[in-house]
Image (cartoon, grey):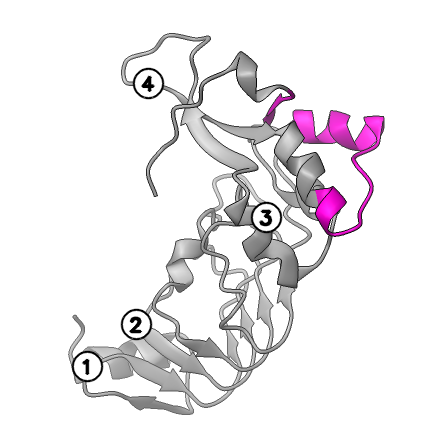
Amino acid sequence: MNTKEEIIEICKKYRIENYSINEDMSINVNESLRLSRLSLTALPLDIRYIKGNLYLENMWWEGANLISDWAIFNKVERIDGDLDVRFNLFNTFYDMPVDRVGGKIEFTKNEAHQTTTNNMHYLWILFEDISKVNLFNSMGILKEEENRIFIHNPPLYEWVVYYSKLKEFLDEIGKPEPTPYQLKKIREFYTVIKDRKKREPKSVSR
């Protein structure tokens, strides 16, 4: 836990001016917070509330750090405005703070570098509706599982899309199933399993 003096210094470093410090040493930011292009993979402080927008978009360059896990926002109780995290590398919708952001969540430009293996952008364009994210997560469509083709110690894990569940989800919200081209793009970043009976998944606990 940071001391009050350390919090003040960190706020100066990131040019956070309009804020208040809570008793538990978390802070409320009473304006928009811009932390763009700083190669951050975590919030620099324990931030509970942001009155405006939060900008955390990054840029690709060799050796850049990129955000890959929505869990970095787990302690943020409310963002009144938009959350902009474009040009990062999210693999999943799990922990996306859909119920704690008052405005838009901008993440669609999460273009994967040629050395990466996963990208959720091609799943997102199938439905593009933040209000449907919790339903998507509840249906077991996307899971991180042990790779059982390549034996490795420690085990290797991969992101798996269960196609029958994806199609069921899209049917439920009135969207068409992926075109052959869209399915091809999804396969570039995920392992797609069309028949659940062909594979007994071993999921990573969350």
Rounded to the nearest angstrom, the CA distance separating label 4 from label 1 is 39 Å
Q: Is residue 53 left or right of residue 128?
A: left
Q: How many C-alpha atoms fall within 10 Å of the one at disc 4: few (<14), some, or many (≥20)?
A: few
| Residue on which the image places disc 4 | 155
- The image quadrant that residue 75 belongs to is bottom left
Q: Is residue 205 above or below residue 132?
A: above
Instruction: Tell us which disc is closer to us: 3 or 1.
Output: 3
Q: Amino acid at mark 4?
A: Pro
Q: Secondary structure at mark 4?
A: loop
The residue shown at (37%, 63%) is 74
Asked if the residue at tag 1 contacts the one at tag 2, i.e. Cβ–Cβ closer than 8 Å, the answer is yes
Q: Position of residue 202 (x, y in %)?
A: 38, 24
Q: Is residue 43 above or below residue 179?
A: below
Rounded to the nearest angstrom, the CA distance separating label 2 from label 3 is 29 Å
The residue shown at (71%, 36%) is 167
Count of picture labels: 4
Q: How many C-alpha atoms fall within 10 Å of the one at disc 2: few (<14), some, or many (≥20)?
A: some
| Residue on which the image places disc 3 | 136
The residue shown at (45%, 18%) is 200
Q: Is residue 58 visible?
A: no
